[in-house]
Image (tube, coloured by chain):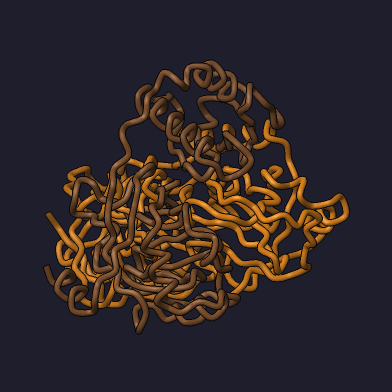
């Protein structure tokens, strides 16, 4: 019941009721596509005894009921299904915009990010808003999307000491990732702006504003536009 | 429907059931009772479905008025409880007459005590569960811990009162032990032999900052032999992650769903409920078992919980 490799998929037990399935060992769009296909497979053909799944950059964690099956039985059943992973075509990616008011009180780390890279705050904004990002997965807290595709010139490590509070809608950078905090949580990402959009809406059928696989752009807006959108 | 009035909420009291499974893709963790075994047994005492919603109290109980009466049971740690002027036992069902008040004190043993009420706490379900997720303010009663003056509705119930008690054998299996059994974590090989041994030799103290999201441990620091940074991946309940400082954090019921720190080990499912009874400054150790042993222990625990002999009528 140790780690095993089937084709180019690697199984790694994570606990007595969970299994990690690695589709690659680095962050690539190719591994991401296979993660999405695997999710399609799990959604199209629900797997008895599997209770939950957590996609990430190049892996999926499956939580299963160990009263119903062993690690070996799960791995065996998965191997058979993974052979058919390419039978699950992916839907077209959605394109979404996140209006963002950069800098000032909304982006307390913008100046420091600019300084670390020898750029002006305006250049950081322009670069951040020029890229198209991909939602690799949602994790950490409800509705938190990990967005890949940040221009290397503004990739910045996390704060040495995380903040105790990050206001909802805060747009942050951590290494070469960017993302939006849906809730007031502790957080170590460097905050460069804020969106008036609600990233997690429990009263809607589509609770999370972003879904895995979406394409996303950030659009700069003024403080006035922020206020208008917030109250809309 | 009958109701209960929160006269005093205690230190941290929330509505919990067995949590919500299946929403990992949108970042929603299961949440649910920190000591799910006590919740299940408590619900059986009052003839509820074992996953009915109840109140989870932390370290200090509260005061609850029952204008319409009800059938209740306390399960988990003994917090010392009185119904008006009479002491009542934890682990035994009790009939509350209309107008009586249940007062629950500070803990005499572990961290959590459950107040189960026949009919269950009725709150609007969020993604199929009544559990409160404090960090995101979702689920439970208005997504938050209870406050003085809150009024909670109780589900319909019409089963006549019967005195039921958790069997001593079942209680014994729940009692505080300071050794937690673990399986190897997915990054166990990021730690060399001496670090791995040091982890199992160490006695850790539960940190003050521990909560339903994570249990922070103080004690010997464990060095990591591999310095590569990890790619964020899904994390399981009870995962013991090692941040760069080398002090472990056990991910708990309100855990983040993904994380980027290496996991040296994972608490076995049969011991997860005991994490819910850890108090700050408790001392614990870890013991390595195989995946086969972990599964056998879970099956034994399930047999015990499902057994009619766990509850004495």
Closer to the camera, A127 or B6? Answer: A127
Indicate left or right for A34 with B82 as reference. right
Above or below residue B68? Residue B105 is below
**Residue B15, percent from left and from top:** 32, 59
Indicate left or right for B125 with B191 as reference. left
Whether residue B145 is visible to the viewer of this picture, yes or no, is no
Q: Quadrant of the C terminus of chain B?
A: top left
Above or below residue A64? Residue A118 is below
Closer to the camera, B237 or A55? Answer: A55
Above or below residue B1? Residue A84 is above
Residue B64 occupies quadrant: bottom left
**Residue B188, percent from left and from top:** 74, 47
**Residue A199, percent from left and from top:** 29, 59
Above or below residue B92? Residue B135 is below
Chain letter, brown in picture: A
**Residue B51, percent from left and from top:** 35, 44
Indicate left or right for A228 with B49 as reference. left
Closer to the camera, B206 or A229? Answer: A229
Q: In which quarter of the image is the N terminus of chain B?
A: bottom left
Closer to the camera, B105 or A35? Answer: A35
In the image, what residue occupies the spot 39% across and 43% down? Answer: B25
In the image, what residue occupies the spot 64% across and 22% down? Answer: A6
Q: Residue furthest right?
A: B194
Indicate left or right for B213 with B270 as reference. left
Q: How many marks?
A: 0
Residue A143 occupies quadrant: bottom left
In the image, what residue occupies the spot 45% across and 28% down? Answer: A49
In the image, what residue occupies the spot 41% across and 60% down? Answer: A179
Chain letter, orange in picture: B
Whether residue A144 is visible to the viewer of this picture, yes or no, is yes
């Amino acid at each position: 019941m140790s780690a095993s490799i089937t084709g180019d998929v690697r199984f790694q037990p994570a606990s007595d009721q969970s299994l990690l399935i690695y589709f690659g060992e680095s962050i690539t769009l190719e591994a991401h596509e296979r993660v999405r296909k695997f999710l399609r497979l799990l959604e199209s053909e629900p797997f008895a005894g599997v209770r939950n799944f957590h996609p990430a950059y190049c892996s999926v964690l499956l939580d299963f009921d160990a009263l119903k099956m062993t690690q070996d039985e799960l791995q065996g059943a998965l191997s058979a299904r993974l052979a058919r992973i390419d039978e699950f075509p992916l839907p077209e990616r959605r394109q979404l915009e996140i209006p963002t008011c950069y800098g000032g009180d909304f982006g307390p780390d913008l100046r420091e990010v600019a300084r670390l890279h020898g750029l002006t705050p305006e250049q950081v904004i322009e670069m951040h808003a020029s890229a198209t990002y991909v939602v690799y997965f949602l994790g950490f807290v409800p509705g938190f999307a990990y967005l890949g595709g940040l221009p290397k010139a503004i990739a910045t490590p996390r704060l040495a000491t995380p903040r105790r509070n990050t206001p909802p809608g805060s747009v942050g950078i951590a290494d070469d990732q960017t993302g939006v905090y849906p809730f007031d949580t502790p957080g170590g990402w460097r905050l460069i702006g804020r969106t008036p959009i609600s990233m997690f809406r429990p009263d809607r059928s589509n609770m999370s504003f972003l879904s895995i696989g979406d394409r996303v752009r950030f659009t700069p807006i003024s403080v006035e536009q922020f206020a208008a959108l917030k109250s809309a | 429907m009958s109701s209960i009035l929160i006269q005093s909420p205690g230190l941290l009291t929330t509505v919990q059931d067995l949590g919500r499974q299946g929403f990992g893709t949108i970042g929603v963790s299961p949440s649910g009772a920190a000591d799910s075994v006590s919740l299940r047994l408590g619900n059986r005492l009052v003839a509820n479905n074992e996953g009915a919603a109840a109140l989870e109290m932390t370290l200090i109980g509260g005061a609850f008025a029952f204008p319409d009466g009800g059938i209740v049971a306390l399960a988990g740690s003994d917090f010392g409880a009185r119904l008006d002027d009479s002491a009542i036992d934890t682990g035994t069902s009790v009939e509350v007459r209309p107008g009586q008040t249940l007062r629950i004190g500070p803990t005499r043993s572990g961290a959590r005590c459950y107040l189960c009420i026949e009919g269950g706490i009725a709150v609007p379900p969020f993604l199929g569960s009544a559990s409160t997720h404090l960090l995101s303010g979702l689920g439970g009663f208005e997504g938050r811990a209870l406050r003085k003056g809150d009024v909670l509705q109780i589900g319909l119930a019409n089963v006549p009162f019967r005195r039921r008690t958790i069997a001593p054998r079942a209680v014994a299996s729940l009692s505080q032990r300071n050794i937690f059994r673990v399986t190897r974590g997915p990054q166990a090989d990021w730690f060399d032999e001496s670090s791995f041994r040091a982890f199992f030799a160490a006695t850790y103290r539960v940190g003050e900052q521990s909560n339903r999201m994570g249990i922070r441990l103080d004690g010997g620091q464990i060095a990591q032999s591999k310095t590569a940074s990890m790619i964020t991946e899904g994390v399981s309940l009870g995962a013991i992650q090692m941040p760069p400082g080398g002090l472990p954090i056990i991910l708990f019921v309100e855990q983040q769903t993904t994380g980027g720190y290496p996991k040296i080990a994972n608490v076995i499912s049969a011991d997860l409920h005991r994490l819910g009874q850890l108090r700050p400054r408790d001392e614990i150790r870890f013991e390595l078992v195989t995946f086969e042993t972990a599964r056998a222990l879970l099956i034994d625990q399930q047999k015990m919980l499902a057994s009619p002999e766990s509850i004495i009528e």
